Image: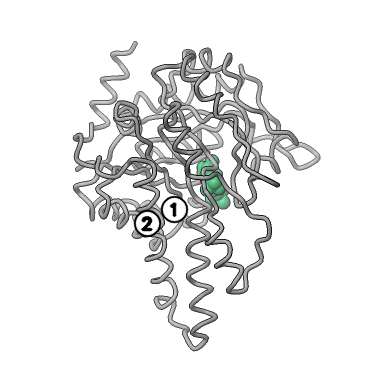
């Protein structure tokens, strides 16, 4: 099976009323674990790399690891996606190394840094302009594009503005119509990382319903969707970690989000947590171990189990054989036909 365009995977998810996880990867064990989970549950999947992941791995290594996953799993529809692309340049680079999908995070200007060390938020007009540039470039090559309206908390809080800006449904219709993005990340109160809420999870799920009315044909994306399960945090802390007050998005809230119109669900932090817990456990229980395979292996196994459970919870399981991936040439013709 060739690589799959994001657009097709999310269109299928919308038809089938299920969600597809987009899992961040940085190394071989993570990629193998996620592939194992997809095989075990017969799920289509999105593997995504952030700018940080590409820099950490020097691009070439991650590219070949991701391509190895594709070669090793010919029966699964797999999307290779750039997560939080900061500008057209990085999107071009990702497309050049074979990604079938890119995100342009046009809600903030990563290329400008203020005296306070922050990146300024972009106006709607500027966001539309930079996102449209990426759409024009990517669609001409059959590659899908995700945009973002509004800002998340978490890591973006540090770099953007002090307050979280939820997506304005009124802007969604204009943004989708003028940019032509295939998918749109909505800011509904989630944030990146392990500390999403102070006392209890609060999400503006009703915004999804409102936005769905404004853009019926665009897929919606929920970033910051790790659940930060208490058992996992307890496990990390039990073996010497220090993560007081960690809290995430409960699975039922994500399932409600899917019902209201979310198709792509971004998960990174839970993967970090489960691997950390497994490695810490080995270090504490078997201090004689110094072969990295003896702790990375359990980390990989624990991650595969966690991702498989998400594939079942999001409703992705069992959908791998529903369709044949379209080629980028077919997608190019599709976009050209849209005028
Ligand atoms: O967007 C957030 C993801 O968790 C990626 O994080 O930039 O540390 O790779 P990163
Ligand atoms: P989490 O930090 O909740 O895993 O979110 C990841 C994400 O949104 C990547 O884009
Ligand atoms: Zn994100």
Percent position of residue 42, x then y: 24, 48
Residue located beneath label 2 in the image: 31
Residue 246 picture location, percent across and down? 63, 54
Q: Secondary structure under badge 1?
A: loop
How many callouts does the rendering have? Answer: 2
Quadrant of the image occupied by residue 337: top left
- Looking at the picture, how far across and down is residue 183, in whole percent? 43, 27
For the residues marked 2 and 1, what is the alpha-carbon distance in whole angstroms? 6 Å
Q: Reply above or below: 100 against 134.
A: below
Q: Residue at x 48, y 17 (%)?
A: 176
**Residue situated in front as seen by the camera: 62 or 39:** 39
Identified at 30% across, 26% down, the residue is 15
Q: Is residue 52 visible?
A: no
Q: Which residue in the structure is indicated by mark 1?
A: 25
Q: Quadrant of the C terminus?
A: top left
**Residue 91 picture location, percent across and down:** 46, 36
* Label 1, ligand 1: CB separation under 8 Å: no
Q: Are marks 2 and 1 in contact (CB under 8 Å)?
A: yes
**Quarter that holds the N terminus:** top left
Residue at the image position 30 percent from the left and 57 percent from the top:
36
């Amino acid at each position: 099976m060739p690589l799959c365009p994001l657009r097709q995977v999310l269109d299928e998810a919308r038809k089938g009323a299920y969600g597809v996880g987009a899992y961040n990867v940085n190394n071989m064990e993570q990629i193998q674990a996620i592939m194992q989970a997809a095989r075990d549950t017969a799920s289509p999947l999105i593997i995504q790399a952030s700018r940080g992941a590409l820099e950490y791995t020097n691009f070439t290594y991650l590219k070949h690891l991701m391509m190895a996953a594709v070669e090793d799993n010919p029966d699964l529809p797999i999307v290779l996606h750039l997560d939080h692309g900061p500008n057209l340049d990085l999107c071009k680079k990702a497309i050049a190394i074979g990604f079938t999908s890119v995100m342009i995070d046009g809600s903030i200007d990563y290329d400008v840094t203020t005296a306070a060390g922050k990146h300024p938020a972009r106006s709607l007009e500027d966001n539309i302009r930079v996102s449209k540039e990426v759409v024009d470039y990517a669609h001409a090559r059959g590659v899908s594009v995700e945009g973002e309206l509004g800002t998340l908390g978490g890591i973006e809080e540090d770099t953007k503005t002090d307050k979280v800006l939820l997506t304005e449904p009124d802007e969604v219709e204009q943004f989708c119509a003028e940019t032509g993005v295939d998918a749109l990340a909505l800011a509904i109160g989630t944030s990146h990382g392990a500390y999403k809420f102070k006392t209890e999870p609060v999400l503006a799920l009703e915004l999804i319903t409102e936005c769905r009315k404004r853009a019926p044909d665009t897929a919606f994306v929920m970033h910051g969707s790790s659940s930060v399960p208490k058992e996992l945090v307890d496990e990390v802390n039990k073996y010497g970690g220090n993560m007081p007050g960690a809290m995430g998005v409960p699975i039922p809230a994500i399932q409600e989000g899917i019902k209201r119109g979310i198709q792509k669900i971004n998960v990174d932090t839970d993967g970090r947590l489960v691997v950390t817990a497994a490695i810490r456990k080995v270090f504490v229980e078997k201090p004689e171990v110094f072969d990295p395979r003896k702790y990375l292996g359990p980390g990989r196994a624990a991650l595969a189990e966690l991702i498989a459970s998400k594939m079942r919870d999001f409703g992705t399981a069992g959908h791998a054989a529903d369709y044949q991936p379209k080629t980028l040439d077919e997608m190019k013709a599709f976009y050209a036909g849209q005028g």
